[in-house]
Image: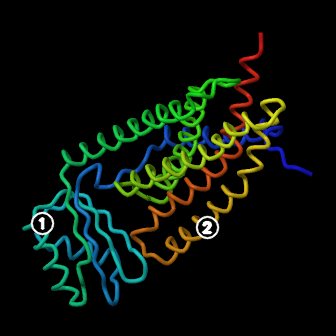
Amino acid sequence: MKMNVITLRPVWYILSGTMIGLSILFLAIWGLKQGIDFTGGSLLAVKYNTRPTPTEVQQVFDTAHVNLGSIVIQPVGEQEMQFRLRHMTEEEHQTLIQALKKKYADAVELRFDAIGPVIGEELRQKAIRGLVIVLVAIALYVAYVFRKVSVPVKSWKYGLVTIFTAFHDVIVPIGVFAFLGHFYGIEIGTPFVAAILTILGYSITDTIVVMDRIRENLQKLSGSFEDIVAASVRQTFFRSFSTSITTLLVLFAIHFFGGESLRDFTLTLIIGIATGTYSSIFIASPLLVSWDRWSRKP
């Protein structure tokens, strides 16, 4: 029995609508918890042989004679601890490190990043602008590539469907991180933006592979548009699925064994690529069929 994902498109639409709706709801209610890349501030990471408690470290900071304001102390792994503070000068940074090393001789500084609020705002604006430019460029590119395909679906519709699936693949991980940020304090930064852009590229590539097969089969096969699309999906299903599985296996390995600093980045990619594989097969092609049917209605 041949699998025909097209006839089950109402199921895929309900599933995708639920994921998109929840993601937008989470984003509207909680928003994304932005890291110092966007808000400005300082991030200090320290490693101990025997890690003290956050309360003990807070007492050391209180005696350092540096007005640090609100501090977020976050244990990481078994030996590390991260501190998120207001924007500090290099002099304040050194004063803080000396206070820690005086109390804990085994303390080793792993990382210190300081970003001013103006730079953070600039990074946020550039990230949004970059995402918009990429989406517009993708729509124009797809419309150009499929410019010779006009029957029964116009070329610009392929572009819009591709943009919708890209939005689908991006909004889901964004919604997940809005949830994780609210309940688990996970922040986003420039690595998150890099992951989102990577997801866009992967999603578009996967979607175009299916659509390109549809374009080829429109010239080779006879039958209704729905039958041709269903045949094209069957022909590309194994390729898309196997490629995604191998990619996800590598990402899972990096996520669990690649260190704490890579986990949020790889988690974003895992969610986005899994969603992208689903949308390229179960959303993009069925949408073309639905659009064709809607356009035929009197």
Residue 214 point in image, percent of width and height: 69, 39
**Residue name at image x 74 percent, y 46 percent:** 233
**Quadrant containing the C terminus in the rendered view:** top right
The residue nearer to you, when weighing 120 against 47, is 120
Q: Which mark is residue 268?
A: none
Q: State which quadrant residue 289 falls in.
A: top right
Q: Rounded to the nearest whole Å, what is the CA distance between mark 1 and mark 2? A: 50 Å
Q: Residue furthest front?
A: 220
Q: Is residue 154 left or right of residue 45?
A: right
Total number of numbered labels? 2
Mark 1 or mark 2, earlier in chain: 1
Is 157 located above or below residue 238 in the figure?
above
Is 212 located above or below residue 288 in the figure?
below
SS assignment at label 1: loop
Residue 287 point in image, percent of width and height: 69, 33
> To which residue does mark 1 refer?
66
**Residue name at image x 74 percent, y 41 percent:** 12
Q: Residue furthest right?
A: 1
Q: Is residue 43 left or right of residue 166?
A: left
> To which residue does mark 2 refer?
246
- Give the residue type at disc 2: Thr
Residue 49 point in image, percent of width and height: 33, 90
Is 228 located above or below residue 203 in the figure?
above
- Give the residue type at disc 1: Val
Is 134 located above or below residue 113 in the figure?
above
